Image (cartoon, helix red, strand yellow):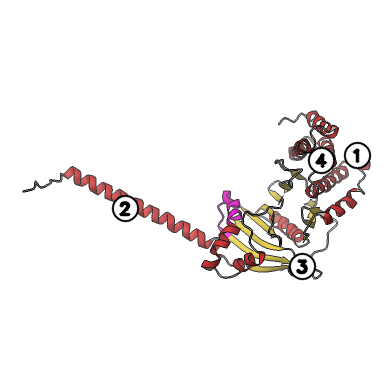
């Protein structure tokens, strides 16, 4: 006869404890999966995009200027709240073989406008398929396309913890172009209790993508910034190559008289002209990333900005220093032994900037 195994009270308690712990873990895991699933489908991956047709806008000479940026020609905001908008490039190993990665405009203390350089996704999808999947009701057939296209842009506002999302497919109705040539892409908005992140993702026929984003507070001032940027978005015309942008910026820069700006007696007007000249030079390096002369002049105008900015306004000094630093590093990538690169380094050292 086999001996019967006697289970003690202590062992019974241990078994019940293990079972209870496992059941609790299962309940928690199920709740987390449910919450993730709910958020997944209630977020942008579960939204059918509305189609928004934008009408091209005329330039507002007071608040905008026409420039190329990468494959775009657009009316970029230059003034907001009666103040010039300074733009800054950040350094990332790129020129002369790649585009500069990012251009940032500080519209106000808490309002940032960002232009990113063109990027080609690892997996290129036809633009018509992207449009169809984003604007159609959700289906299993389109689920992988939605995840592939939206994933990185859904991650961008991660620090916000968005409570509201909006998704649209936009197209600038330019009657001079065929439907295929018209500027188009999708717009993704993420909003939380205090701020909104607007992202316009432009998709070229080639598959390349280009991002414009605006981070703004949920205030009347933030709404005004959105209205101005939306006006700029509707002005954008996309080109298949850079020659059109290069022709435009070369004509525009030929009219700039830097000596006259240096000798301007009105400090506010001189600051405005310096900022606008910097915008033109940033536009130049966006379409000619191997232009040493442009980085040299961008460094020179940054030095002038540092000399003309009110020392109490750290905001201006910081942006000018950023452009000066990036100009030197890009120049060093392009032509490390060129005398102009040494001059840019001297500008940088004279301002007591350390890396």
Mark 2, other Cα within 10 Å: few <14 / some 14–19 / many ≥20: few
Q: Distance between the Cα atoms at labels 4 and 3?
A: 35 Å
Residue 297 left/right relative to 157: right
Foreground of the two, 54 or 335? 335
Foreground of the two, 62 or 39? 39
Mark 4, other Cα within 10 Å: few <14 / some 14–19 / many ≥20: many
Q: Which residue is mark 2?
A: 23
Q: Describe the element under mark 1 as helix, strand or loop.
A: helix
| Circles 4 and 2: CB atoms closer than 8 Å | no
| Circles 4 and 3: CB atoms closer than 8 Å | no
Q: Which residue is mark 4?
A: 295
Q: Distance between the Cα atoms at labels 2 and 1?
A: 75 Å
Q: Is residue 274 above or below residue 307?
A: below
Mark 4 or 1: the one toward you = 4
Whether residue 159 is in magenta: the answer is yes
Total numbered circles: 4
Q: Which residue is mark 1?
A: 262
Q: Describe the element under mark 4 as helix, strand or loop.
A: helix
Q: Distance between the Cα atoms at labels 3 and 1?
A: 39 Å
Mark 3 or 1: the one toward you = 3
Q: Position of residue 117 (x, y in %)?
A: 72, 50
Q: Which residue is mark 3?
A: 55
Q: Residue at the spot x=77%, y=55% of the render?
A: 71
Foreground of the two, 62 or 21? 21
């Amino acid at each position: 006869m086999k001996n019967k195994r006697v289970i003690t009270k202590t062992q019974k308690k241990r078994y019940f404890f293990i079972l209870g712990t496992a059941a609790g873990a299962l309940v928690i895991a199920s709740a987390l999966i449910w919450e993730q699933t709910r958020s997944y489908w209630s977020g942008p991956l579960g939204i059918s995009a509305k189609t928004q047709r934008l009408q091209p806008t005329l330039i507002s000479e007071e608040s905008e200027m026409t420039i190329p940026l990468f494959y775009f020609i657009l009316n970029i905001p230059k003034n907001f709240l009666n103040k010039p908008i300074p733009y800054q490039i950040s350094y990332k190993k790129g020129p002369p073989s790649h585009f500069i990665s990012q251009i940032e405009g500080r519209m106000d203390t808490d309002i940032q406008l960002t232009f990113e350089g063109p990027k080609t996704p690892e997996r290129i999808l036809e633009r018509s398929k992207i449009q169809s999947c984003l604007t159609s009701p959700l289906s299993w057939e389109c689920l992988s396309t939605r995840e592939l296209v939206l994933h990185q842009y859904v991650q961008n506002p991660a620090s916000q913890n968005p409570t509201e999302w909006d998704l649209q497919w936009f197209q600038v109705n330019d009657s001079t172009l065929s439907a295929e040539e018209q500027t188009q892409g999708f717009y993704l908005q993420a909003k939380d209790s205090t701020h909104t992140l607007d992202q316009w993702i432009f998709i070229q026929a080639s598959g390349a993508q280009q991002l414009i984003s605006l981070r703004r507070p949920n205030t009347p001032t933030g709404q005004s910034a959105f209205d101005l940027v939306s006006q700029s978005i509707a002005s954008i015309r996309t080109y298949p190559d850079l020659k059109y942008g290069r022709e435009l910026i070369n004509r525009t820069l030929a009219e700039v008289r830097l000596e006259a700006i240096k000798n301007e007696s009105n400090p506010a007007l001189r600051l405005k002209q310096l900022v606008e000249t910097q915008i033109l030079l940033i536009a130049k390096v966006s379409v000619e990333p191997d232009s040493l002369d442009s980085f040299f002049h961008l460094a020179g105008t940054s030095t002038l900005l540092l000399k003309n900015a009110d020392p109490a306004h750290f905001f201006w000094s910081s942006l000018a220093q950023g452009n000066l630093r990036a100009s030197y590093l890009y120049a060093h990538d392009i032509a490390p032994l060129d005398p102009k690169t040494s001059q840019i380094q001297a500008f940088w050292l004279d301002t007591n900037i350390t890396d």
